[in-house]
Image (spheres, grey):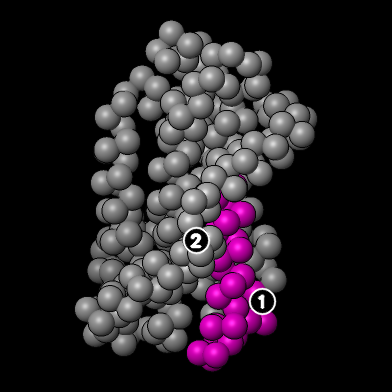
Amino acid sequence: MFEYLKKRDIILTLTKYEFKQRYRGTALGVAWSLIVPFLMALVLYTIFSKLLHRTEYRVLYLVVGIFFHRYFAMGTSIGLNAITGKVHLVTKTTVPREILPLSTTLAYGLSSFIEMVILLPGIIYFGGNIRYFFLLLVLHPIYVLLVYGINLILSPLNVYFRDLKEIWSVVTQLMFFALPIIYPTEIIPEDILDIYMLNPLVRLLNAYRDVMIYGRIPNIYDLDYVLAITLILLVVGHVIFNKLEKGFVERL
């Protein structure tokens, strides 16, 4: 299914290129990835302080949520253009095309991981418990695979439906409010809580907060659920990608 992963050299080269492109032309480089979310956190904390007062570690709760959503928004928005943005690689080389969304996902996943590790001093300063912070090494690869599964679906669809970019920008904005970023899950009405928890990102965000703030091991059942959804997305994405790949050259 993933025979293209044997082409590690190509994947590494493209991932390095994508990672460099992430900060190309910026004077502060990775610092911008921290400044923007923190400014956003400041504004949101001011506006939604009453909701956040119902959570423990209010500032950290908000900041981790923002950085978590940031990877979903950027990773999928850029991954969506993984094929349409690299026409020369699709039409003039024999590079396995599934590597294109993979390299984009990996590059932004690495960037996101670095950002979260840089948060460590701030987490300690605000009293967070980092006893199980190392489990981020397990959680983040799962998140990257989940985003990759989504990108396997979005990137080929974007070749056929160019309006998808605009539609997806709305989806990522809606997801910000659909996730417990500025509010705790406790305020979700009991009668819709089960439906709300069907979103694997909700469970994964809770797991991130567990290891980055609360110093506890994530709920194993939540992780099993996230892994199951991730595998489904990868399989479905692979099928869709292979089916639509035949028309790439013609459409591009």
Q: Quadrant of the N terminus?
A: top right
Q: Quadrant of the C terminus?
A: top left
Q: Residue 238 placed where, x, y %?
A: 56, 27
Can you tell which quarter of the image residue 211 is in? bottom right
**Mark 2 highlights which residue?**
27
Residue 149 lies in the magenta stretch: no
Q: Position of residue 95 (x, y in %)?
A: 65, 21
Examine the rendering and report whether any part of residue 246 can be seen.
yes
Badge 1 marks a residue whose secondary structure is loop
Q: CA distance from mark 2 to mark 1?
A: 34 Å
- Inspect the image, locate mark 1, and give the three-letter code of the amino acid beneath it: Tyr
> How would you classify the magenta stretch by its main secondary structure?
helix
Closer to the eye: label 2 or 1: 2
Q: Does residue 91 appear left or right of residue 62 in this picture?
A: right
Picture residue at 43% right of the left edge, 78% below the top:
61
Q: Which residue is mark 1?
A: 132
Q: Residue at x 38, y 27 (%)?
A: 158
In the displayed structure image, the side of residue 216 where residue 134 appears, left or right: right
* Disc 2 packing (10 Å; few <14; some 14–19; many ≥20): few
Residue stretch in magenta: 107-133
Could one spot residue 144 in this view of the protein?
no
Please name the amino acid that badge 2 sits on. Ala
